[in-house]
Amino acid sequence: MTRPRLLEARLAEHVEKLGAEHPPIDLASVDYTVRDPNTFSARFGHVLDYMARVELEVDRNVLELMTMLPDPPEVDRRFYADVWQPQEIRHGLILDELQTRVGRPPATPDTDSVSAKIKVLGALGRIDKLQDVTRMLYYLTGMATERSAVLAYNLLHDGVRELGETAVSDTIVAPIRRQEPGHYAFYKMSAQGLASQLAPWQRWLVRRLRTISFSPVGVNNPEQLADFGDLMLTLGIPDDLDSFAETIARVERELLWAEEKGLRVPPYIVAGFRSAVEAAQARSGERSLEPRVERRSA
């Protein structure tokens, strides 16, 4: 069996296993009990809103994928349409229900807009050799998104337990975070397999497009950039921002920037996260945390 065929078989097996072992979370298993709704909402309400919106926007993400990948491998389509989308939608519905139960308004996801950037990638993807470039961008974005989600849900879980809200931590946050690593693994295997097949010019183009297009998960405008910064501040991520970025970017660095000796994190990833923190601080009028972040990461 050739290497691409072997990879395809491994991916198909992984997707089937994800679908069988991690069906959408059973709503009957969820306990929305919150002992102190006011404190919980004040501490984590905006985090829930951001996460719920991002999870619920997977319907738009699928439209984007259909636009940018006009002829995807069947295993990709099976993953995003039959496994990933149902799981993520259920995450969003649960988080949104939780935030409304503690007195917050429901999330307002954008489920049907496709950006001009995605349409351009879709047009490029109709050219045979360029579809591999757009696929690689999809896998890299998926890796960064899912790794960010895993880390954020871990921190949210710990924070919710510290408040004593065990029903939320045990029946909502913990089940959601258990499903995210499988998504990350799919993107990682896909990216590693495709990277080995790219020509030098395709790899150069991926690096260039990734450099100019990277943004944190769920960020589509300046307001959402500040919202993501608020999420990071609440979860304590800026206290060790470079380590957070390095964890997210480790595989991407190995695939695209291995020849850059000493480069721990691609600079566009660090810049994207720093800009989110700065946008949140500017919106609230707080003093910049940049000096403290640099001391922690030195």
Image: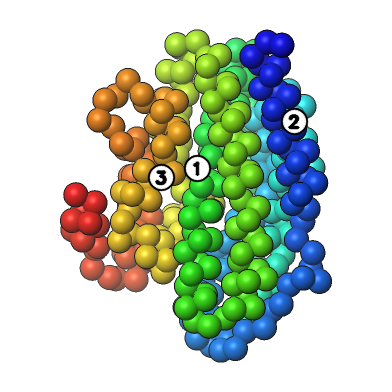
Q: Amino acid at mark 1?
A: Ala
Residue at 36% over, 25% down = 257
Residue at 52% over, 34% down = 140
Residue 164 on image: x %, y %: 53, 83
Q: Please name the residue that numbered disc 2 is placed on.
A: 12
Task: Answer with the quarter of the image where residue 139 lies.
Answer: top right
Marks 2/1: CA–CA distance: 22 Å
Circle 2 residues within 10 Å: few <14, some 14–19, many ≥20 = some
**Is 247 left, or right, of 168 in this rendering?**
left
Judge whether 252 appears above or below 61 on screen. above
Q: Amino acid at mark 2?
A: Ala
Residue at 78% over, 45% down = 19
Element assignment for label 3: helix
Q: Amino acid at mark 3?
A: Thr
- How many numbered marks have been drawn onto this rendered protein structure? 3
Nearer to the camera, 161 or 211: 161
Circle 1 residues within 10 Å: few <14, some 14–19, many ≥20 = many
The answer to whether the residue labelled 3 contacts the one labelled 2, judged by CB atoms less than 8 Å apart, is no
The answer to whether the residue labelled 3 contacts the one labelled 1, judged by CB atoms less than 8 Å apart, is no
Q: Please name the residue that numbered disc 1 is placed on.
A: 144
Residue 194 on image: x %, y %: 57, 21
Q: Earlier in the sequence, mark 3 or mark 1?
A: 1
Residue 247: numbered disc: 3
Q: How is the image coloured?
A: rainbow
Quick one: quadrant of the N terminus? top right
